[in-house]
Image: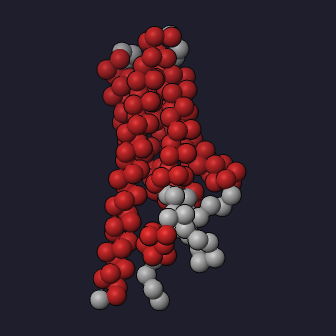
């Protein structure tokens, strides 16, 4: 019975993390994709520059939202180290996004708002899968026994199964 309770607790924690990650991602999507459109078609920047700038703005928002909401109960390896890892993995996610947009724009030679938004959305989706895995695995680490979680009711969930 105890192992079933531990499995249920882990699934509940994962569901909460996925839900908050998704909500933050939805807000970041609203910052990033329309922002890229404004920079591309309103300001006149290139497609890759537009995507990069809009995504960087969205990334600053997502770091703070994930640190203080999605993974608030997890420990911190120090904010500078944590932010550096976040930036590195976010950069890899951005590279995935830029590759999708660049392929559409320069290889397929599709240069219109529908093509940009489709490629950008596909890149965001692929990058998001990578980001969730990387953030959870290397950036926002589980609370160790020596640390106390910021939210006491999540203490049992973040510690994992009893041994």
| Quadrant of image for the N terminus | bottom left
Residue at x-position 56% and y-position 38%: 60
- Residue 21: x %, y % from top left: 41, 50
Q: Is residue 29 above or below residue 151?
A: above
Comparing 144 with 68, the one in front is 68
Question: Does residue 158 show up?
Answer: no
Residue at x-position 45% and y-position 69%: 154
Residue at x-position 62% and y-position 72%: 147
Comparing 30 with 93, the one in front is 30
- Residue 119: x %, y % from top left: 37, 30
Residue at x-position 37% and y-position 39%: 26
Comparing 87 with 64, the one in front is 64
- Tell how many labels: 0
Question: Does residue 24 show up?
Answer: yes
Which corner quadrant of the image does residue 144 belong to? Answer: bottom right
Q: Is residue 156 above or below residue 42?
A: below
Q: Is residue 40 above or below residue 161?
A: above
């Amino acid at each position: 019975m105890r192992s079933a309770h531990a499995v249920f607790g882990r699934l509940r924690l994962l569901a909460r993390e996925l839900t908050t990650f998704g909500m933050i991602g939805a807000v970041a999507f609203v910052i990033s994709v329309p922002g890229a459109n404004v920079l591309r078609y309103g300001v006149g920047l290139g497609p890759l520059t537009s995507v990069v700038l809009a995504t960087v703005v969205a990334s600053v928002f997502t770091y703070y939202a994930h640190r203080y909401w999605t993974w608030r109960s997890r420990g911190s390896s120090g904010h500078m180290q944590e932010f550096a890892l976040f930036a590195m993995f976010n950069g890899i996610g951005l590279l995935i996004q830029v590759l999708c947009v660049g392929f559409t724009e320069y290889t397929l030679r599709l240069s219109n708002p529908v093509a940009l938004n489709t490629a950008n959305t596909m890149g965001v989706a692929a990058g998001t899968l990578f980001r969730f895995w990387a953030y959870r695995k290397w950036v926002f680490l589980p609370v160790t026994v020596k640390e106390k979680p910021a939210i006491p009711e999540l203490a049992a969930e973040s510690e994992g199964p009893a041994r």
